[in-house]
Amino acid sequence: MSDIQKIVVPDVGGDEVEVIELCVSVGDTLEADEGIVTVESDKASMDIPAPFEGEIVSLSVAVGDKIKEGDVIGEIKTSAGAEENSSDADDSEANDSEASSSADAESDSESSSNESPKEESESTSDSAKSSGGNVIEVAVPDIGEDGEVDVIDVLVAVGDTIEKEDGLITLETDKATMDVPSTHAGTVKEVLISNGDKVKEGTVVIKLEVSGSDSPESTESSSTDSSDSAEKEAKSSSAASSDSSSSEVIEVSVPDIGEDGEVDVIDVLVSVGDTIEKEDGLITLETDKATMDVPSTHAGTVKEVLISTGDKVKQGTLVVKLETSGGASASSANEESKPEASKQSDSSSKESADKKTEEKSKAPAQKPAPAKADTGSDSGSDKESNDGKAHASPSVRRVAREFGVDLTLVKGSGRKNRILKEDVQEYVKAELAKPKTAASSGNVPVGDNVLQIVPVKPVDHSKFGEVEEQKLSRIQKISGPFLHRNWATIPHVTQFDEADITGVEAFRKEQNAYHAKIKSGLKITPLVFVMKAVAKALEKYEVFNSSLSDDGESLIIKKFINIGIAVETPGGLVVPVIKDVNKKGIEQLSQELIDSSKKAREGKLKSSDMQGGTFTISSLGGIGGTAFTPIVNAPEVGILGVSKSEMKPKWNGSEFEPRLMVPLSLSYDHRVIDGAVGARFAAEVAANLTDLRRIIL
């Protein structure tokens, strides 16, 4: 015999979490601790595991539902062999069975399956007390990085007792170092990460034994309260199972597609007589943002197609009439909030179990990371891998619609190649990083290439002589796509001017001689005076100290002045930000600039050191050149380039005299700043540099 047990949500580290994926279907056979559903909180995503081995009888949640600790998400039928073993143990000696349950949680779970729902809650509570708590996995939360980062320190060891928010490991990114905090208090049972490892969001760090009060088994009252609904599910399941020999014709309609009005049907994917599976595409729709398939809600045979190519449809429009098999009849389909709640036939259960076993033998030990979509010339192969269909949850389809992504071009990394939210995000990032693939001719822009960029034809340079390939640095790989985006999407205007810094340079040398005499270690550079001159001009022309709003309808004027300084490092350019430049003196700014430049060259800048900038200065004065066109660093609207100063003859009204002149190159976002305002700002900066007394006014 076998028994049906409820699946209860354990401690998920928050009030409510959202179900983002169903990892199993009704009829699947699972191992103990195998994931049933994937949930997402504000910190991380995690799987709700099966409490013990068995067959899924029903699921009472769907993608998008909100669940919390103690909720019942389905039922699982324990294996008969396991139950007989536990029954024999109970018959021979109940007390010995209780003692063995402390050492073997699975035996305890199976022995408790013979008891009534009320007795089950009591035995579960006893199990939690005897085991001392529940072991959970603590994973890396969202750390604001797309790829993997280095682990530079492990802060805990097996046996340590830690509090919630205590640091577990220290990570180092290209911008900062940070600790991964614990989501719960408890005792460390296993540490899965070592120094030098690479991790990303979702990587399991430790296994933590939480106290009995936090254990999922301690939710006795929640389990008891939900027992009635579980019994009702079991009854409906049995009723549907008894009707499995019949078949019915159901109507499949257009679901919520995220559009208020009607959309065009550009392709009909099925014909009368076709046999289709659940989630197979029926028709393809085209909105103003993307194309998408309408999936079938059931498996069966198409009896009638009610839509033709060119028709317009909306949510609720009938698409096909489908003859379903007994196991997927309409009566089970219409059960409220419990998709696929009916039992599958014995043969289908066996097939599902065999398929599950085969998948498990092929699957890797850990859940695979989302695969990056190839947006190059292999886009056709992407479509082929999806068979022209997009298998994704409604929440993922909503994200795809927001970004205008055609899901048929995205490779899915989830269960059964299902497309996850991370897959869509990776696809969008890859699309932004490079232009669309060229047409076969290679000399005309591709039609869907928004920027109409004609790509460069591939060239085998080795045909013409010796070549050497050098990899880009990590900073170049990160900054390259952003520079490309800024240059391609911001209408740049560059204003050229020059400033007379003869007086500034004389004053600077006097101050450096003074600091050398008193051995203070401080050295003032010309760049500090440029920072003060720019800060004074930003106070007068606030439009240069602003950002364009996300909707492009307004300006965000910033009442603080933080200036980013481009610093050359062995790995590429980085931009540390000096805060409140308008409120600090020359000596303080000089010291901060020295410290920031040193940290940048040593790779010790934190993420916070490079955030919050309102304007950027890029100086090539120590290298050379007469002018250049710096790229605006979005979301800022302006950047000042400084070139090498040069002694020039200047007419003073009666004669030429030598003056030290520095070239200035001011680039700005023409959507925000008019040319006249740009010219006035450049002249203001030049005037401030020429006469330092203006800065104190």
Image: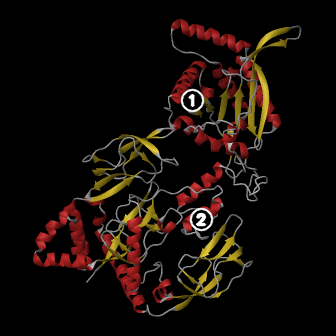
Q: Secondary structure at mark 2?
A: helix
User: Residue 175: percent from the left, percent from the top?
Assistant: 51, 38
Q: Residues within 10 Å of mark 2 (few under 14, many from 20)?
A: some
The quarter of the picture where residue 411 lies is: bottom right
The three-letter code of the residue at mark 2 reads Arg
Q: Which residue is mark 1?
A: 569
Q: Is residue 50 visible?
A: yes
Q: Secondary structure at mark 1?
A: strand
Residue 262 relative to residue 146: left or right: right
User: Residue 129: percent from the left, percent from the top?
Assistant: 21, 63
Q: Residue at left 43%, top 54%?
A: 202
Residue 281 relative to residue 326: left or right: right
From this view, report whether residue 38 is shown above or below residue 619. Answer: below
Q: Residues within 10 Å of mark 1 (few under 14, many from 20)?
A: some
Q: Is residue 611 visible?
A: no
From this view, report whether residue 241 is shown above or below residue 591. Answer: below
Residue 28 relative to residue 481: left or right: left
Earlier-in-chain disc, 1 versus 2: 2
Q: Residue at left 66%, top 61%?
A: 404
CA gap between label 1 and label 2 equals: 42 Å
Image mark for residue 398: 2
